[in-house]
Image (cartoon, helix red, strand yellow):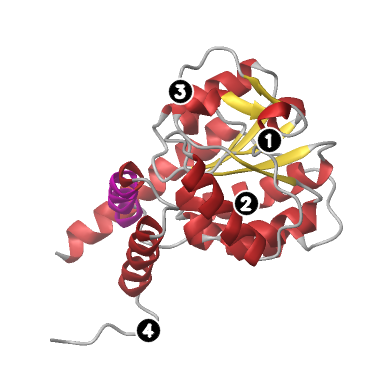
């Protein structure tokens, strides 16, 4: 068997799978999260398993929006915690954002596992764990409707990676600015959010952390609909190039 070069994107994909399986074994990731990742892998292949120009523009806009926010919150689910715990903490520190655990398939066991890995990575305070400070978002039936009064409920900007469309719409209806990672530029989440980063979350989070360290720009011209259209064109060009080389 031919060894995969260390720089090859396929190796990164295999490492991500290993992290998620390990996360499942340690109660971080729900089995449904493994299925969701499989769908994401397919879209990552379509974009060429690399960060596109449109994604980089979205990342710049996201860093600025988070830094300009009055009360920004990074929403964390099992997949996100398993894949990017150190980056979550670094981004929260760079942008003065809160961290809140919010799960579709919620259980105390998973919350404790996610809290443990976040604290191990450097988190000092984590929202979404105290039932006394919880409230509900309107317009959503899943467990993700339960949010922290001092976290997502009162936030002006929420980073919601690997998100379901229902909660994104509910958060928008609650007048929040939404930043998301979504490898599918045609999803409800992608089309509803204010900033959609069409990229693998592990690549994009590293770039977002680096971007959040920069000083200077306080604003940026950004249109999410135009950016999504550009993402689709990039996918089309990548497929045409591969078809030509097949």
Whichever of labels 1 and 3 marks the residue nearer the N terminus, that label is 1
**Residue 64 on image: x %, y %:** 76, 47
Say which residue label 3 marks.
142
Q: CA distance from mark 1 to mark 4?
A: 43 Å
Whichever of labels 3 and 2 marks the residue nearer the N terminus, that label is 2
**Residue drawn where x is 62% and y is 21% of the image:** 172
Say which residue label 4 marks.
6
Task: Identify the secondary structure beneath mark 2.
Answer: helix
Contact flag, marks 3 and 4 (Cβ < 8 Å)? no
Q: CA distance from mark 2 to mark 4?
A: 25 Å
Q: CA distance from mark 3 to mark 2?
A: 29 Å
Whichever of labels 3 and 4 marks the residue nearer the N terminus, that label is 4
Examine the rendering and report whether any part of residue 130 can be seen. yes
Residues shaded magenta: 34-46
Q: In the picture shown, does residue 220 fall above or below 136?
A: below
Q: Quadrant of the N terminus?
A: bottom left
Tell whether 121 sits left or right of 237. right
Say which residue label 2 marks.
59
Task: Identify the secondary structure beneath mark 3.
Answer: loop
**Residue 29 on image: x %, y %:** 40, 50
Whichever of labels 2 and 1 marks the residue nearer the N terminus, that label is 2
Say which residue label 1 marks.
130
Examine the rendering and report whether any part of residue 198 can be seen. no
Q: CA distance from mark 1 to mark 3?
A: 18 Å
Tell whether 136 sits left or right of 155. left
């Amino acid at each position: 068997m031919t060894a995969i070069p260390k720089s090859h994107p396929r190796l990164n994909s295999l490492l991500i799978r290993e992290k998620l399986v390990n996360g499942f074994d340690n109660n971080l990731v729900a089995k449904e999260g493994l299925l969701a990742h499989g769908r994401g892998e397919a879209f990552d292949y379509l974009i060429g398993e690399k960060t596109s120009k449109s994604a980089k523009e979205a990342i710049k806009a996201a860093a600025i929006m988070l830094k300009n926010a009055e009360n920004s919150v990074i929403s964390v689910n099992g997949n996100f915690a398993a894949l990017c715990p150190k980056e979550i903490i670094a981004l929260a520190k760079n942008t003065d954002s809160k961290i809140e655990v919010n799960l579709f398939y919620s259980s105390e066991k998973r919350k404790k596992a996610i809290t443990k890995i976040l604290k191990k990575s450097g988190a000092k305070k984590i929202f979404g764990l105290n039932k006394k400070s919880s409230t509900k978002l309107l317009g959503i039936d899943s467990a993700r409707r339960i949010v922290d009064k001092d976290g997502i409920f009162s936030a002006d900007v929420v980073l919601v990676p690997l998100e379901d469309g229902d909660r994104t719409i509910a958060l928008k209806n609650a007048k929040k600015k939404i930043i998301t990672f979504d490898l599918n530029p045609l999803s409800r989440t992608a089309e509803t959010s204010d900033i959609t980063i069409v990229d693998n979350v592990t690549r994009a989070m590293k770039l977002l952390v680096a971007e959040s360290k920069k000083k200077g720009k306080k604003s940026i011209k950004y249109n999410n609909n135009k950016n999504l259209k550009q993402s689709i064109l990039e996918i089309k060009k990548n497929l045409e190039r591969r078809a030509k080389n097949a």
